[in-house]
Image (cartoon, rainbow, N blue to C red):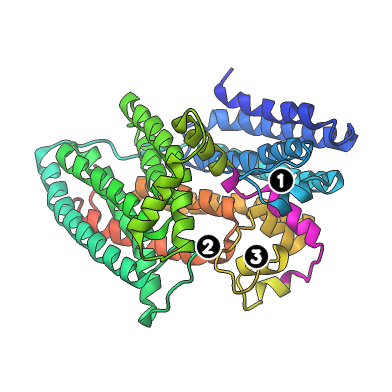
Amino acid sequence: MGLRWVLLFIFPVGWYFTQAYYKYNPTYLISTLVATVSLGFLLLILGRSSRSVFALAIWIIVGIVVAGYFVKFYWLSGLATIDGVVTDSFDNKTLALASMPDLMLKTYWVFTIGFVAFCLSAMLALILLEVADGELLNSSLILEDRAEDSLREKVRRLVIPLLIFTAVAMIISAGAQYVLGIGVAGVQAQTTSYRLGGIIFYLRSISLPFFLLLILWLTDKFYLKKIFAVSLVLLLVHGLTQTLLTASRGALPGLFIPLVLIWILSGKFNFSRKLLTVVSLVVVLLLHPLISNYRMARIGGNASDLSGAISSSTEKASSRETDNVIKDLLMSGIGGYSARIPGTECILMVLEYGESKGLFYYLFNKRSLGDIYTQDVAGMDPEAVIGISPSLMGMFFLLAGYAGVVIGMTGWVFLWFFVCLVLQRMKMKTVVVQLAMICLLIALVTSEGDIGNLPFRLLLLAGNFLLGEFLVRKFIFRFGQQAA
């Protein structure tokens, strides 16, 4: 039995341990059975499409939905049975809503319906791939390695200047971001002339990571080990710098995840890289509570005082009353990242909000969908700096109720089916890096539900993709020449 079948046990096990809280409600059992059967059929088809890039995107969505909705539902259900429970993972409002069994059951039905719609749509899309062209989105289409000296020299002539330019851009943009106070989590954004703040933010969050990953892919592909090592160090430096500048807990994972995806899609995810991935995951988990303390120190004090915030964060971590600080930090990191995936609590709030002003109200409102959710549904002050992610199904349910969840999750599957289809049909040389970045975007938006900003992100990624593709074709492969 493949490891993927372990996922099926999550639903019945979760139901078994929480059924008493819901007084053995038969609808709860039926919903669990439907979700389990739907996932079972999807896993069967995913097993036949294990090397499909589109299947990888489906796996990402499955993981986020199971963790953010189902696992979190069982987690909240367990906490609701404990009187006076206090936890850093959930706020008091979420815990109060979780103590209402009827509201929790309605929440379960909402995301179960959305999950079933997603599974059916994903199965249809995967079957269409098999019928139309089984190799259409297969990772075996990746360019075969070429190590000839002439081609390697062309790659070297491209990546060295590109790496230098990227490093210089990293330094200049980091200085500008620090001076202008751009993109600091939980701190009021500074107004800049000529939209300079937005340019710097997206340069550092999208463009620079893309070109660093492109260089890493090329140097790995053509065995330029020294340049590969330098590029890997630069990627790490960029991630650490972004963490310090923005106080974001997702800066490092947001860079390392697409790199791992590139290795997987390139067929170069060997044992040493798997070990490196595990070690990196542990480090990221250990850093989570430290970065959280660092963020709060910057929000509560001088946002530009990085050294003071770092000192405050480390002092708070070292003062933990525990016999094993490392274990405590690791468990805090696991809990923090698990709770950070929006899901059940978002639908709880929408159901408690209970007001639907119609689809057109939300689509043509001057405020963004995220602001509407933060202010109207979550009830936060319009002047508040920190926003709340509505989650994908939470946003769909807010827009159009149950129909919105069904139509939205179905459309979500076929949107990425179309995107992957276009990228492969265009036969781009750099498709591996492009698909890794697309998978990261899928993960972010599926988790957060920020669909209002999706068209702009896609447009920005497309611009970077075209520029990277132009450079590779111009300096390595001639236009119209057969790929290596």
What's drawn in magenta, residue-wise?
Answer: 339-359
- Which residue is located at x 67 percent, y 69 percent? 375
Check disc 3: other Cα within 10 Å, few if <14, some if 14-19, many if 20+.
many
Q: Nearer the viewer, residue 2 or 166?
A: 166
Q: Which residue is mark 1?
A: 117
Whichever of labels 2 and 1 marks the residue nearer the N terminus, that label is: 1
Whichever of labels 3 and 1 marks the residue nearer the N terminus, that label is: 1
Check disc 2: other Cα within 10 Å, few if <14, some if 14-19, many if 20+.
some
Whichever of labels 3 and 2 marks the residue nearer the N terminus, that label is: 3
Indicate the position of residue 403 as horizontal and vertical percent values. Answer: 77, 57
Indicate the position of residue 149 as horizontal and vertical percent values. Answer: 10, 39
Q: Quadrant of the C terminus?
A: top left
Q: Furthest residue to the top?
A: 1
Per the model, the C-alpha gap separating discs 3 and 1 is 27 Å
Secondary structure beneath label 3: helix
Q: Is residue 77 above or below residue 462?
A: above
Residue 374, disc: 3
Q: Furthest residue to the bottom?
A: 193
Q: Quadrant of the N terminus?
A: top right
Q: Is residue 251 above or below residue 28?
A: below
Q: Which residue is mark 2?
A: 454
Indicate the position of residue 220 as horizontal and vertical percent values. Answer: 24, 38
Q: Do the residues under discs 3 and 2 have CB atoms within 8 angstroms?
A: no
- Which residue is located at x 34 percent, y 24 percent? 271
The kind of residue tagged 3 is Thr
